[in-house]
Amino acid sequence: MADINAVAKQFTDFYYTTFDSNRSSLGSLYRPSSMLTFEGTQILGAPAIIEKLTSLPFEKVEHKVTTLDAQPSSVTVASLIVSVTGQLLVDDSTNPLAFSQIFQLIPEGGSYYVFNDIFRLNYG
């Protein structure tokens, strides 16, 4: 198995850079069986996930990752769980929003796809 921390870092760098610049380009990271739980709402399949992400009510967003943790998620497959916390700067707001996001990445070819994605804003 590749160094999971390096894989997690490379994945999250790509994911958030792409999300912040062109959310519709994230479709290649999801499959028909992928599920996003966004603020408690479950969304199944790449097209529906991308529709949700592109319909979010903001023009600009910037993710700032604070923590990044990774663990293997199977003893037989080189899959991993990635847990991220951070802050979002939305549109022209100067007040960042805290968030947490968990990805389960499954190997496919020489890369990974997102099987599970759980996103929450953290209030408090």
Image (cartoon, helix red, strand yellow):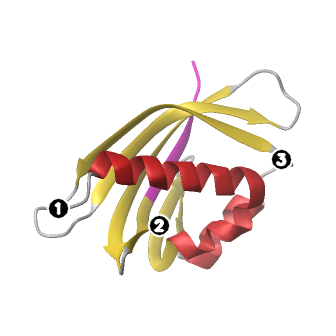
Residue that badge 1 annotates: 74
- Residue located at (22% from left, 56% from top): 73
Q: Position of residue 64 (x, y in %)?
A: 62, 33
Please state which of residues 42 and 47 is positioned toward the viewer in this rendering.
47
Res. 83 image quadrant: top left
Q: Which residues are magenta?
A: 117-124
Residue 118 visible in this rendered orientation of the protein: no
Badge 1 marks a residue whose secondary structure is loop
Badge 3 marks a residue whose secondary structure is loop
Res. 115 image quadrant: bottom left
CB within 8 Å, label 3 to label 1? no
CB within 8 Å, label 2 to label 1? no
Residue that badge 2 annotates: 35
- Residue located at (44% from left, 46% from top): 9
Residue that badge 3 annotates: 58
Amino acid bearing label 2: Met
Mark 3 or 1: the one toward you: 1
